[in-house]
Amino acid sequence: MNEKNFGKKLLYARYRHRGTEKPAGERNSSFSREKEYLDSLSKAYAYWSALYDVREERRRNLRYKNGDQWGDYVEGEDGRPIKEEALISASGKIPLKHNFIQQFIRNITGQLLNNENQSVVFARCAEETDLSEMLTNTLQAANYLNETDKLSMNVLEELLLAGIACVKIRYDFWSSKNRGDGRIDLVNINRLFFNTDIEDPRMSDLNFIGELHDYTPEELIRNFATSPADEKELLELYCPVTDDAGLSAVAMNPQKLEIAGAFNGSPDGTKCRVIEIWEKKGRWVTYMHDYADGTEQITTLSPKEIEEENERRRAQCASAGIEQPEQLLIYAEPRYEYYWCVKYLTPQGVCLKEMETPFTHEEHPYVLAVLPMTDGGIKSGIGDLIDMQRYINRLIVMLDFIIGTSAKGVLMVPESAIPDGMSAEDFAKEYTKANGVIVYRPTPGREVPYQVSSNSTNVGAWEMLQLQLGLIEKISGLSGAIQGQVPAKNTPSSLYAQQAQNSSLNYAVLFRVFNMFAEKRDEKMLKVLMQYYTDKRHIDISGRAYSETARYYDPLMAQKIIDFNVRVRQSADSPVFRQITENILMEFVKAGLIPLDVYLDNSSMPFAEKLAASIRNKQQQLMEAQQQMQAPVNQGQNLTETPPEEEMETGEEVSQEDLNDAVIPPELSRMPVAPE
């Protein structure tokens, strides 16, 4: 094997295992039916079923968040389960509620929106600053395309409702942009499954993950068919999915994913269910270290082929007179490595597509955000508030019932007090009428009408309600200071600010988990973009004055950045942070540390870009005017220049200052000169 052919085969062997599918010729049909697929399907169903409690808790929290807080089933008078709302209504009460959960979630989401962050790629080497700025613009452009601000609100809400959130990052075709680009999709928890034996809070022991898809027949054919024969076979596999009946029955229904049979089929029966499974497997490979160029890699070359290459190098070293050829040989040994593979299965266990991970990061495309786990358990962010919310609702219903059953201005009228010729209805009407007059003849022993009004029975319900409202505010951290309510009189501003800051500490863990999730999401998205961006792209979407290197994404320049030399972090981008930046820059301008154009390039004011462009245009005009005025000066220098022979004879030299004074008119010498 010559050196050229060995290099080609080595390059092919290095990437041969990544993203390759099983050839169609090795299967009986375009779609395979094997026992291993049924085993994977059974494992996926077991993991999906194990997450039932997580989905059930999320469904209950979502009901409370949306206002359905009397939907839990309790035992009725006849011993059969009945909804609390129906039981309260049957007892003659009104199922009132005070939705504190919705208020709590809105406050948390508002804090996220009020403290905006943006993804920034930091380079650890000063020489890679321009390249990191280019990657920052690339990542921010992809996030803008995917509207990550909206996704972030949903991710934060999922952490509160279920304690776990998931997104999927891939490279797909955007029909609205008519190009391929990075894509971020939010994965519904009802469709997600993964191995539930994880114990590491960082989820490093994750080895099985996937989701349930519902495709229309057209989407199914587009994703998995490669020929008209495949289209026909796919339609035969999903032949019952042809009728749109029942589509409106579950339209816009938040509980449509909880309908029975959610794993084996779509909730409405009008779409094709496909189970996507990513599994971490192991295999024996050959580890190779080439001492000639210092490269280390995993190869599928056989030991015989590597030994043939070593023999060829020994022969070359012998002919060249090299006494120690071991320094130029290839060292190889067998090793056991892990790799991720994906398969798309039907509910019957038919494999529609199978391949190893197509991504260069060699992982699955999912990014999980999980609140701190204890012993592998997941707890929602509002789980502790549900019981307190229920007790508050019970107290409100109790107080309403007490008030409704108490006497409120009941008129006690003896029959002897009603005048002759007037009925009881006429008496009551005249009594309640404004300026009403009732004329009767008083007689000895005749009783006088009187009105009865009593206060509600004091059973401590009001005090208990105030106690529960105070407790739920303390536990949730949703105090009056953080809500912006008017403080009590004589409250110092420093104390009010300290109360708001202390209340926000209750959300520190939540926002820290979210920021770590955003960093992992952006890091994986950046790796996908660096893999699939093979052509030069214009990414200067913000309109700010970037360097020429950062305006375009260049894949050749991106290859210079080593993965571990770049880190994606979240940078503050709130109005308060921008105002502080503006004040610091203005102080630099006043102190003369930076010029005005540098300040405008780094300013976030709306008119900064327009003003900077106007200043540059004015400077350009002044420079052009100066060049035009220098032209006659140069001509005058040529006319008055002393010939070389005369200069040698007289021994005098004409200075540049004297020459300018003699040629330039006084009115031209006062023209402004553009700064350098």
Image: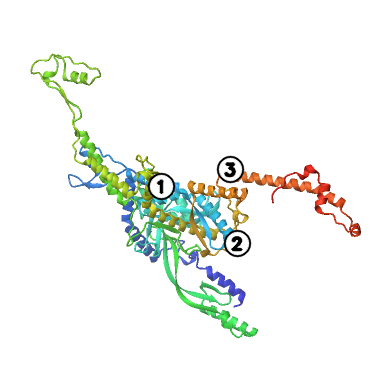
Q: Which residue is mark 1?
A: 109
Dot 3 amino acid type: Phe
Residue that protrudes farthest toward the left in the picture: 445
Q: Which residue is mark 3?
A: 607
| Mark 1, secondary structure of its residue | helix
**In this rendering, position of residue 538 left or right of residue 214:** right
Residue 556: which disc? 2
Relative image position of residue 153 (x, y in whole percent):
42, 49
**In this rendering, position of residue 118 left or right of residue 385:** right
Which of the two discs, 2 and 1, sits closer to the camera? Answer: 1
Report the front residue among 349 and 15.
15
Report the front residue among 16 and 193.
193
Kindly tell me whether residue 86 is visible in this rendering: no
Kindly tell me whether residue 66 is visible in this rendering: yes
Corner quadrant of residue 611: top right
Q: Residue at x 22, y 40 (%)?
A: 398
Residue 126: which disc? none
Quadrant in which the N terminus appears: bottom right
Q: Which one is earlier in the sequence, the residue at label 2 or at label 1?
A: 1
Which of the two discs, 3 and 2, sits closer to the camera? Answer: 3
| Mark 3, secondary structure of its residue | loop
Question: Contact, CB < 8 Å: mark 2 with mark 1?
Answer: no
Report the front residue among 261 and 74.
74
